[in-house]
Amino acid sequence: MLDTKLLIEQNNQKRELLTQENEKYYSDMLLYIRLQWSLSEQQSEEILMELLDHLLEGQSEGKTAQQIFGADPKAYADEIILQLPNEERRKRLPFIAGLVGNLLGWFFIIRGVILLIAPLFQKQEVNESFYLLSAIIIVSVIFVIILFSIRIIFKIISNSLFQEGKSRETVKVGLVGAVGMAIILAVTYFLPDFGPKIHFPAYASVIIGAIFWIVSRFLEKKR
């Protein structure tokens, strides 16, 4: 049995053999299925490969994707999704841990870089301390906003597939990102400082952030 990454690589190569019409039909169906993140990734890629092989075989006989799979690709994809099992919880943990690690990594790296370059633009001494509880709340809000935004964006993209005009969906995605960023900035600006005050130098922030980022990349490759 081929692993997921190899299946995705082979799928990318084989899709180049499709005609423009068939590639558009199949790619929409592929993206629609892949966006169902709760499904088993391995079995999703296996069924996508089977569909692609079937389409290539039909294409060699002069058939179109619509003739093979029908005029309603969304309904066909929904039938496939109902038959696919959900991803096992133990396989979701590396993804969640990697996402958290990546978020914390960039949070600490950006903080450290800002503190390092701040003296170049201001004369007053840079405050390298932070309040623990306030920081925990801010990081938690960022994490929740990111997860919520990803879920909404996936939903918007799914709804835009199998359609010709997608400009409205692009605007919706932009609005989701803008609202999410506005909430994060508002919480960061208006949240009062409370909890233990901790001195955390800029260089230490960059180092800790780099460690979190490396660990998240490792977990991503282990998936």
Image: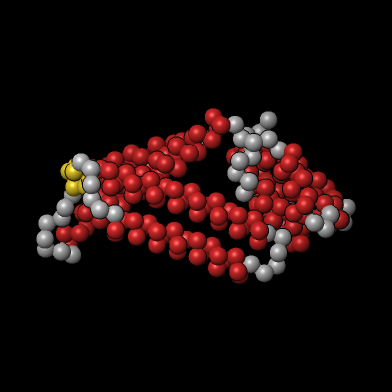
Regarding residue 59, the answer to whether it shows in the image is: no
Coloring scheme used:
secondary structure
The answer to whether any part of residue 115 appears in the image is yes
Residue at (50% x, 54% y) in the render: 149
**Residue at x 39%, y 50% (from the top left corner):** 142
Q: Position of residue 157 (x, y in %)?
A: 61, 58
Quadrant containing the N terminus in the rendered view: top right
Does 153 sit above or below residue 42? below
Residue 3 drawn above or below residue 15:
above
Label tally: 0
In depth, the one of 29 and 140 nearer the eye is: 140
| Residue 75 as seen in the image, left or right of residue 138 | right
Residue name at image x 66 percent, y 33 percent: 2
Task: Return the x and y of residue 108 as percentages of the image width and height.
Answer: 30, 47
Of residues 34 and 217, the one drawn nearer to the viewer in this rendering: 34
Q: Residue furthest left?
A: 124
- Horizontal placement of 25 versus 220: left or right? right
Q: Taking 203 as reference, is 62 left or right? A: right
In the current view of this chain or complex, which residue is farthest to the right?
61
Q: Percent from the top left, x then y, of residue 23? A: 73, 57
Q: Between residues 149 and 213, which one lies in front from this camera angle? A: 149
Q: Residue at x 23, y 47 (%)?
A: 194
